[in-house]
Image (cartoon, grey):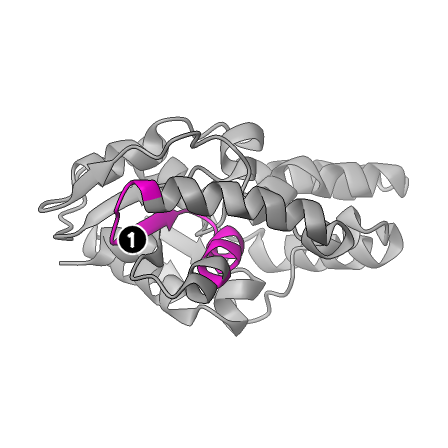
Amino acid sequence: MRVALFVTCLADAMFPDVGKATVTLLERLGHEVVFPEAQTCCGQMHVNTGYQRQALKLVEHHMRTFEPFEAIVAPSGSCVGSVRHQHAAVAERAGKAQLAARAGEVAARTYELSEFLVGVLGVTDVGAHYPHRVTYHPTCHSLRMLRVGERPLQLLRAVRGIDLVELPDAEQCCGFGGTFALKNADTSAAMLADKLRNVLSTSADAVCAGDSSCLMHIGGGLSRLSVDTKPVHLAQILAAQ
């Protein structure tokens, strides 16, 4: 299958190894991965902060960039959630019915990584080997918007050498939420403290998630505690051999 990598802003600017791991994984499974160089921000932060007019331009650009592809995959539940639940709505509010229809078609071919692997390809064992103790944090958008369910855990359970341990209160938000962490810093910090306490209670070498944004938030907290537990993206574990 010819797959377009929707790499996301964070992977592009701050976590390129997550994008590389996604490519490595998909190519190992026999798929052609294409990187549309014209891609930009999906517009999620603009929509969430009230900049609808500016977001509309990004939605239009996203359609032009990704319409040619039969499958679009991103290592981010958050950004896929935006494409699936915000793009058509932004176009509809602007009175652009044709753009809304196009956005719906592209959204139907856009997948978070675990969705694509398990739901589309029917694969749970990707041939990974990761001999470490790992706990998994289900990010809010993947859990509540995309409803990926057990798919990430199915993939992790099939990894050779892994010691996968359950995270207490796993479905509790880590406190990031994009601009929420800036506008409600004290609340965000308190939520993060709860998440860190639960992560550390597992004695895991790594905390895994499907969103770099949440891992950035959790990783920042872990670094300030000077502990050995590291944030690792799901794609990086699945690409490891």
* Nearer to the camera, 120 or 8: 8
> Which quarter of the figure has residue 39?
bottom right
Residue designated by label 1: 206
> Which quarter of the figure has residue 84?
top right
Q: Is residue 75 above or below residue 10?
A: above
Where residue 135 appears, as percent x and y from the top left, is 30, 42
Where residue 188 appears, as percent x and y from the top left, is 65, 48
Residue 32 shows up from this direction: no
- Report the residue at 39% width, 53% height from top: 3
Horizontally, is 57 left or right of 111 in the view?
right
Where residue 98 appears, as percent x and y from the top left, is 78, 40
- Report the residue at 19% width, 35% height from top: 157
* Nearer to the camera, 93 or 50: 50
Q: Is residue 142 above or below residue 6?
A: above
- Report the residue at 81% width, 42% height from top: 91
Horizontally, is 164 left or right of 117 in the view?
left
First to last magenta residue range: 201-220
Check disc 1: other Cα within 10 Å, few if <14, some if 14-19, many if 20+: many
Q: Is residue 98 above or below residue 207?
A: above
Q: Quadrant of the C terminus?
A: bottom left
Q: Is residue 217 magenta?
A: yes
- Report the residue at 83% width, 37% height from top: 92
Horizontally, is 138 left or right of 202 in the view?
right
Where residue 41 appears, as percent x and y from the top left, is 65, 62
- Disc 1 is placed on an element classified as strand
Q: Is residue 79 magenta?
A: no
Residue 118 shows up from this direction: yes
* Nearer to the camera, 140 or 176: 176
Amino acid at circle 1: Ala
